[in-house]
Image: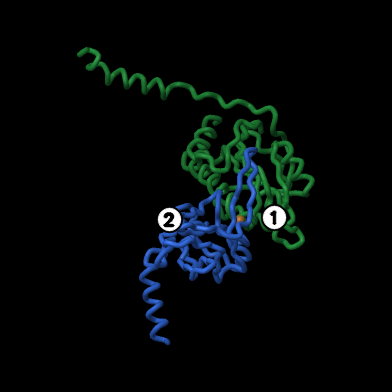
Chain colours: A green, B blue
Amino acid sequence: MLTVFRWWPVLAGLLLLAACAEPRQELPVNTRLGGDFTLTDHHGQPFRLADQEGRVVLMFFGYTHCPDICPATLARVSQVYRNLREAGDAEAVQPLFITFDPVRDTPAHLSEYVPWFKANVIGLTGSEAEIRAVAEQYGVVYLQSGDGAAAEYDFTHSDYVYLLDQQGRVRKLYPSDFNIDEVTDDVQSLL
Amino acid sequence: MMYKAFFNGLTGAALLALAGAASADDLVLENAWLRAVPPVSPTMAGYFTLRNDGDRAVELKGARTDIAGGAMLHDTETTEDGQARMVHLSGITLEPGDQATFAPGGKHLMLMKVASIPEAGEEVKICLTFTDHDDLCSDFPVRREAP
Ligand SMILES: [Cu+2]
């Protein structure tokens, strides 16, 4: 009994070491979603996902006229980016924001919107058909509601955040209120 | 008249010493804030908790503020398949003892046609409006994150 007590701190220490050293569960590749696409970035230049090869991508869809979830999600993704930048991993990760709303979210509008988050976010837009196609690739559903003619309309939309690996494969989906540390850790597990 | 206005102002200032809070005799407003958004945004969302400490029901109907062309009570509903959508709430009834929580991803005060987006650190006077109750005004601090 005494012996056990004496050795207990050592045992506990060893267990702790073992837990830390245990390799992380590798994130499975999602084969149902994803794929390459080309849209237009907030500088008005063509943006092809495949050109991000070698970088981990954090991607999500939204629109800038959305005041509640979209800026909150952008702020959280930006925080993940800043955490990674502090860890020296900024070059290895790219946040992307794809709009559902190309009519209002032009490259010019996005160029005034995304830099505010100070996280190197690339804003992406395109024709309605182009955006619809990308959304379908990623299993995103969205529907315009309200009166488009009145310029006061919203979108009902899926609000997942996608983690893509260096080959552009979907590795994980998060809800928009994801845990910042979890996503930061997941990105680093891919680096 | 001048004197009364000044006196009211003084009482108001004392009540509002803590930004983001206000109370009438029966209604208590706490944790009020506006989410900071890029200056190019046309809309902003506001959050708060409102408690009815009185002995009669009140109905929150909306809000007004000089910075916005319109303000509405909205809710963000998320369906089981992860679809989020905003819906307009025509009013929220608070029975005695009830509390309404407006928080990110759920109920929010939606400010529309905001002419000039305030920056983080600024404060914006917003008055909540009710049926059969005086407006309840408070200075909402603009913040990048929830308090
Ligand atoms: Cu809203």
Q: Quadrant of ligand 1?
A: bottom right
Q: A49 left or right of A23?
A: right
The kind of secondary structure element at disc 2 is: loop
**Residue B102 point in image, percent of width and height:** 51, 54
The image quadrant that residue A108 belongs to is bottom right
Q: A21 left or right of A153?
A: left
Considering the image in quadrants, where does the N terminus of chain A appear?
Answer: top left
Which chain is home to disc 2? B
Q: Which mark is residue A105?
A: 1
Instruction: Return the residue found at the far left.
Output: A2
Residue drawn at the location 57% of the way across and 43% of the way down: A176
Instruction: Return the residue found at the far bottom.
Output: B1
**Residue B99 point in image, percent of width and height:** 46, 54
Q: Which mark is residue B97?
A: 2
| Amino acid type for the residue under numbered disc 2 | Gly
Instruction: Return the residue found at the far right.
Output: A129
Q: Are marks 1 and 2 on the same chain?
A: no
- Between marks 1 and 2, how big is the CA–CA gap? 44 Å
Which chain is home to disc 1? A
Task: Tell me: residue A67, above or below residue A23.
Answer: below
Residue drawn at the location 57% of the way across and 55% of the way down: A116
Question: Closer to us: mark 1 or mark 2?
Answer: 2
